[in-house]
């Protein structure tokens, strides 16, 4: 099924452009316009953190890159190739399912919830896609999976099932599973939001190591410390638009836009409230003893 827009030579990015490029990307669900025209580029090896309130369109943008949703308008390229659509005889058409699957295999995605197969061990979860999607021999996939589980600090948990693992361990298995496809891009959608506070650090440490190794990453997060310490660029989104972007120091310490300032003030207030509550609970436990 063709789109109404005509393809033109200017649709294709020039050689040497960023790994990810979005131009006027829009997405509507019925009458609800979630993304209102996103222009964003991500260089190879760059770590970009997307910040913003719930409902600002951050997760939808990731889902468009990974083709879990279909663009309403605009274009997204990954590695110079249009995502989800292709040019045939001067017009743009939806890609065939097999072609979409090929593109998606180059992009790893880690969700809020771990989405592991409950009936497979950590090793089995990591081996699944390489064996059944990429048709990699089982022995080779097993060797790679063992290496990845060791990389995320779970070499001693390869035979454990998800129910036997903590939330942080399950999320690290999910990261290893995504890496097993050797993606050129990793997308993280609030990967620590479902974790107990004491488990957040172990997942963030794995992500920091990936960043240090040069993995291109787009991370939706409320972890300001991670954004400050690891991101090359911070992008603040609100109401389906990019409001402000720049270095972590610029956006987090010296925001220019009022919406950015209000969001960061609210995040700081909520963090202080959580810290005060935790301190009060600790004091209560000490008093009980």
Image (cartoon, helix red, strand yellow):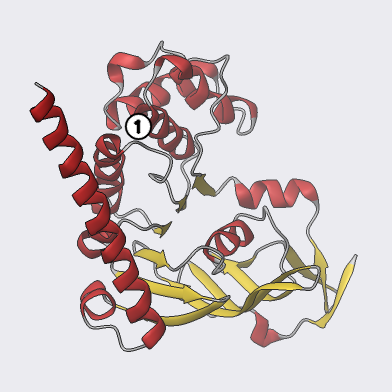
* Residue in the foreground of this view, choosing between 169 and 12: 169
What residue is pinned by disc 1? Answer: 168
Expressed as whole percent of the image width and height from the top left, the position of residue 161 reads 46, 14
Which image quadrant is residue 45 in?
bottom left
Q: Is residue 106 above or below residue 15?
A: above
Q: Is residue 124 above or below residue 98?
A: above
* Residue in the foreground of this view, choosing between 174 and 113: 113
Residue at the far top in the pictured view: 159
- Neighbours of disc 1 within 10 Å: few (<14), some (14-19), many (20+): many
Residue 13 in view (yes/no): no
Question: What residue lies at 79% left-to-right and 73% top-to-bottom?
Answer: 31
Question: What residue lies at 55% left-to-right and 32% top-to-bottom?
Answer: 115
What secondary structure is marked by label 1?
helix
Expressed as whole percent of the image width and height from the top left, the position of residue 162 reads 47, 19
Question: What residue lies at 31% left-to-right and 59% top-to-bottom?
Answer: 270
In the displayed structure image, the side of residue 101 where residue 236 appears, left or right: left
């Amino acid at each position: 099924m063709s789109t109404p827009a005509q393809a033109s030579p200017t649709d294709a990015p020039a050689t040497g452009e960023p790994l990810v490029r979005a131009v006027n990307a829009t997405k509507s669900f019925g009458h609800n316009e979630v993304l209102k025209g996103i222009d964003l580029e991500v260089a190879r090896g760059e770590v970009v953190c997307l910040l913003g309130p719930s409902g600002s369109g951050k997760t939808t943008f990731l889902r468009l890159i990974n083709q879990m949703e279909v663009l309403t308008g605009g274009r997204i390229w990954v590695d110079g190739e249009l995502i989800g659509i292709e040019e045939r005889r001067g017009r743009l058409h939806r890609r065939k399912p097999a072609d979409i699957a090929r593109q998606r295999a180059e992009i790893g995605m880690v969700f809020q919830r771990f989405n592991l197969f409950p009936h497979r061990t950590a090793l089995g979860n990591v081996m699944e896609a390489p064996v059944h999607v990429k048709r990699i021999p089982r022995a080779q996939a097993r060797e790679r999976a063992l290496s990845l589980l060791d990389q995320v600090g779970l070499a001693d948990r390869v035979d454990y099932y998800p129910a036997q693992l903590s939330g942080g361990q399950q999320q690290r298995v999910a990261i290893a599973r995504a890496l097993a496809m050797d993606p050129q891009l990793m997308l993280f959608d609030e990967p620590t939001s479902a974790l107990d506070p004491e488990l957040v650090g172990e997942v963030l440490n794995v992500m920091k190591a990936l960043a240090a190794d040069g993995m291109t990453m787009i991370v939706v997060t409320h972890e300001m410390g991670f954004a400050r310490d690891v991101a090359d660029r911070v992008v603040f989104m609100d109401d389906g638009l990019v409001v402000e972007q720049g270095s972590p120091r610029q956006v987090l310490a010296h925001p220019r836009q009022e919406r950015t300032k209000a969001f960061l003030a609210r995040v700081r207030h909520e963090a202080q409230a959580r810290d005060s509550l935790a301190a009060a609970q600790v004091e209560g436990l000490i008093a009980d003893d």
